[in-house]
Image: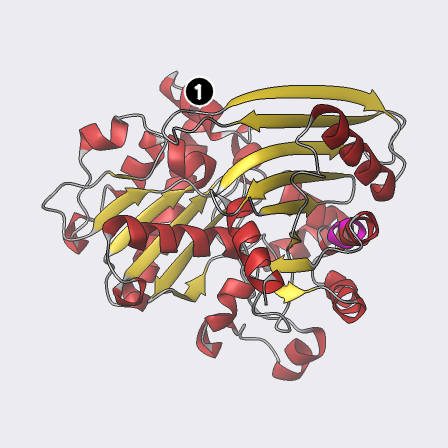
């Protein structure tokens, strides 16, 4: 057994998962939330695996409410849960701790062993990700105190996209201003895009280096990436995770002049504008619901707002698919992943409905058929293979952390 503890920390919560990288099975997972509030909540789930890998694991979940004043206290609660409910960290002691960090800037292009200097760099990069990096840093510091003798590895969402050419990541604004404030496209969801593109190549038994792929990570947050030979060459998210596709609560692409209009007419402050585009826009702004399942249900009932929201979502998605077909010079594989991408046959069908000219042909029965694993949903004759690939960012972080820790 080779356990790796994966931590995904925010400002008021953190998720964790203990993964055996030998079997790639989750041993336990949990969520510590409402940190700093009067009543915090800690949930811990233990997975029990039999010898037959094809048989689903059973699980047991426990939950408790108690004050959790800070991340350090949160990690103490997590350790108590392992001690009380298992698995025992004496028997499954982590060989490494992997941390998801959203923004690595242009400084970090691979998983990195965390030192005091790396912590300083993550802190400095908080200017580019004020909603994400500070929480990640709190989690890192608490975890390093709780697991002082274990290597800690930062895995950056932006790292996979550091292979983008300058033409793809450069914004057409004053060069000196951009350099002074480090304004450029960084891209996000990189851990997922890397995992999914590699899993697709392995499933098709084709060399990753030979494939041109368009990966569509469609969840509450959504991004598209053009992957050429395993390397990101363009992606939809930008300086922040706001740019690109329509998302659950984020607008995606928008004319920047809209901000000036709102600032002048409604006297909105920069903070209010940021909250407006990140939390009151996207599907929620268009239809009052951020969950695609609600949008599709209401659309089927004839709700005009949900219908428009769905149509805007698909219109933007098609625009990016078409753009990346052009940038790649065609595609061998298109992959759908994350909550919407893995579960919404309607979104997949609508997104690709106009791409028959590009050799993309869905098999309706395969697309509609429910399934949990990797599956092909294109026709056998389709020149472009379309896949649904469940993402597993935690497993990818565990793999990368173990590789770095093993030296």
| 12 in the magenta segment | no
Q: Which residue is pictured at 82% across the width and 49% down the height?
A: 142
The answer to whether 236 appears left or right of 331 in the picture is right
Residue 152: give x, y in percent of width and height.
70, 57
Residue toward you, 91 or 268: 91
- Viewer can see residue 267: no
* Magenta span: chief secondary structure: helix
Residue toward you, 333 or 51: 51
Question: Number of callouts in the render?
Answer: 1
The answer to whether 113 appears left or right of 19 in the picture is right
Outermost front residue: 91
User: In the image, is residue 90 above or below residue 67?
Assistant: below
Q: Which residue is pictured at 42% across the width and 65% down the height?
A: 232
Residue 101: give x, y in percent of width and height.
66, 56
Range of the magenta residues?
Answer: 135-139
Q: Which residue is mark 1?
A: 298
Which quarter of the rendered picture does the N terminus lie within? top right
Outermost bottom residue: 176
The crowd level at tag 1 (other Cα within 10 Å; few <14, some 14-19, many 20+) is some
Outermost top residue: 301
Outermost left residue: 381
Label 1 element class: helix
- Viewer can see residue 50: yes
Residue toward you, 229 or 250: 229
Residue 266: give x, y in percent of width and height.
74, 46
């Amino acid at each position: 057994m080779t356990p790796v503890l994966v931590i995904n920390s925010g400002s008021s919560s953190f998720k964790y998962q203990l993964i055996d990288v030998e079997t790639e099975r989750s041993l336990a997972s949990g969520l510590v939330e409402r940190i700093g509030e009067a009543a915090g909540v800690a949930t811990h789930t233990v997975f029990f695996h039999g010898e037959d890998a094809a048989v689903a694991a059973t699980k047991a979940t426990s939950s408790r409410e108690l004050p959790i004043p800070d991340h350090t206290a949160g990690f103490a609660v997590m350790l108590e849960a392992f001690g009380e409910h298992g698995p025992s960290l004496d028997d499954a002691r982590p060989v490494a701790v992997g941390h998801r960090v959203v923004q690595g800037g242009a400084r970090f292009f691979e998983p990195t062993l965390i030192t005091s200097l790396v912590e300083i760099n993550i802190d400095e990069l908080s200017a580019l990700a004020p909603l994400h990096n500070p929480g990640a840093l709190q989690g890192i510091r608490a975890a390093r105190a709780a697991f002082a003798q274990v290597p800690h590895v930062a895995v950056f969402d932006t790292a996979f996209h550091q292979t983008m050419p300058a033409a793809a990541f450069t914004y057409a604004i004053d060069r000196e201003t951009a350099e002074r404030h480090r304004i450029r496209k960084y891209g996000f969801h990189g851990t997922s895009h890397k995992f999914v593109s590699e899993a697709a190549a392995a499933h098709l038994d084709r060399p990753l280096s030979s494939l041109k792929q368009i990966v569509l990570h469609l969840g509450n947050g959504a991004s598209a990436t053009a992957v050429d030979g395993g390397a990101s060459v363009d992606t939809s998210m930008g300086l922040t995770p706001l740019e690109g596709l329509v998302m659950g609560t984020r607008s995606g692409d928008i004319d920047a002049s809209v901000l000036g209009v709102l600032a002048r007419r409604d006297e909105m402050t920069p903070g209010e504008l940021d909250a407006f585009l990140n939390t009151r826009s996207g599907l929620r702004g268009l239809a009052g619901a951020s969950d695609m399942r609600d949008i599709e249900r209401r659309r089927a009932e004839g709700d005009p707002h949900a219908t428009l929201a769905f149509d805007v979502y698909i219109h933007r998605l098609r625009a990016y698919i078409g753009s990346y077909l052009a940038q790649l010079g065609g595609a061998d594989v298109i992959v759908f992943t994350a909550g919407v991408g893995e579960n919404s046959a309607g979104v997949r069908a609508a997104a690709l409905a106009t791409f028959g000219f590009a050799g993309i042909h869905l098999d309706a029965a395969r697309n509609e058929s429910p399934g949990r694993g990797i599956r092909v949903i294109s026709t056998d004759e389709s020149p472009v293979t379309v896949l649904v690939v469940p993402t597993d960012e935690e497993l990818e972080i565990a793999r990368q952390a173990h590789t770095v820790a093993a030296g």
